[in-house]
């Protein structure tokens, strides 16, 4: 199997997880600012606690950008390894799988039987694609 394409899918799913943690108002990494007991910037005595409340979101954003950069690099390496069609399918299936795992683990999402059956079909198709070996065309001498 093309490990680089699978790794790019994992990195893409992790980037999506980090983006959701950084931008979702109900993100579990910082206290909710929508409660009536929270203080606005003008009611706070200090600016530092307000800024520290958003520091974890900023860190998630920066790490997400880094993961995306590495993801693109590993995806391109995966395309060199097994061709664009197989690498794209493997990367997308890997992304789909890890996104589902992250949703279940971090956001308590549920998975039904129809979803699981579709997932098994996607993984089976990717397995078939990953068994195909590319033949290199001979170079023509002019």
Image (spheres, helix red, strand yellow):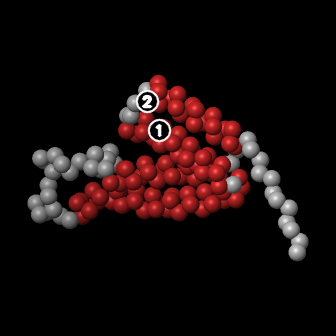
Q: From the viewer's perspective, is 35 left or right of 112? A: left
Name the residue located 51 percent from the left edge and 58 percent from the top edge.
67
C-alpha span from label 1 to label 2 = 8 Å
Residue drawn 35% across the image and 54% down it? 22
Residue at the far bottom: name it: 142
Q: Quadrant of the N terminus?
A: top right
Horizontally, residue 136 falls left or right of residue 115, namely: right
On residue 64, the disc is none
Residue 61, x across and y down, in percent: 40, 59
Q: Residues within 10 Å of mark 1 (few under 14, many from 20)?
A: some
Q: Quadrant of residue 121?
A: top right
- Tell me the quadrant of the picture where the C terminus can be found: bottom right
Q: Secondary structure at mark 1?
A: helix
The residue indicated by pointer 2 is 111
Q: Is residue 7 visible?
A: no
Q: Position of residue 25 (x, y in %)?
A: 27, 50
Q: Nearer the viewer, residue 105 or 92?
A: 92
Residue found farthest to the right = 141
The residue positioned farthest toward the top in the image shown = 113
Residue 114: image x %, image y %? 47, 27
Label 2 CA crowd tier, 10 Å (few <14, some 14–19, many 20+):
few
* Image side of residue 39 versus residue 23, left or right: left
- Can you give x and y, in whole percent of width and height, for residue 40 in the image? 14, 58
Task: Examine the rendering and report whether any part of residue 81 can be seen.
Answer: yes
Q: What residue appears at the point 66 percent right and 49 percent down from the top-left corner?
A: 86
The structure residue drawn at horizontal position 28% and vertical position 46%, both measured from the top left corner, is 26
Marks 1/2 in contact by CB < 8 Å: the verdict is yes
Residue ranking furthest to the front: 142
**In the shown orientation, is residue 108 left or right of residue 88?**
left
Give the structural element (helix, strand or loop) at label 2: loop
Residue 100 - label: 1
Residue in the foreground of this view, choosing between 137 and 46: 137
């Amino acid at each position: 199997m093309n490990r680089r394409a699978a790794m790019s899918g994992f990195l893409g799913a992790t980037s999506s997880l980090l983006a959701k943690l950084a931008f979702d108002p109900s993100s579990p990494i910082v206290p909710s600012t929508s409660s009536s007991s929270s203080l606005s910037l003008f009611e706070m005595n200090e600016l530092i606690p307000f800024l520290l409340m958003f520091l974890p979101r900023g860190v998630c954003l920066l790490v997400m950008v880094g993961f995306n950069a590495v993801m693109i690099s590993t995806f391109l390496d995966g395309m060199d390894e097994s061709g664009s069609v197989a690498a794209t399918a493997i990367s997308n299936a890997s992304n789909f799988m890890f996104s589902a795992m992250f949703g279940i683990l971090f956001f308590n999402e549920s998975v039904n039987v129809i979803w699981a059956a579709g997932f098994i079909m996607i993984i089976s198709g990717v397995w078939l694609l990953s068994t195909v070996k590319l033949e290199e065309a001979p170079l023509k001498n002019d």
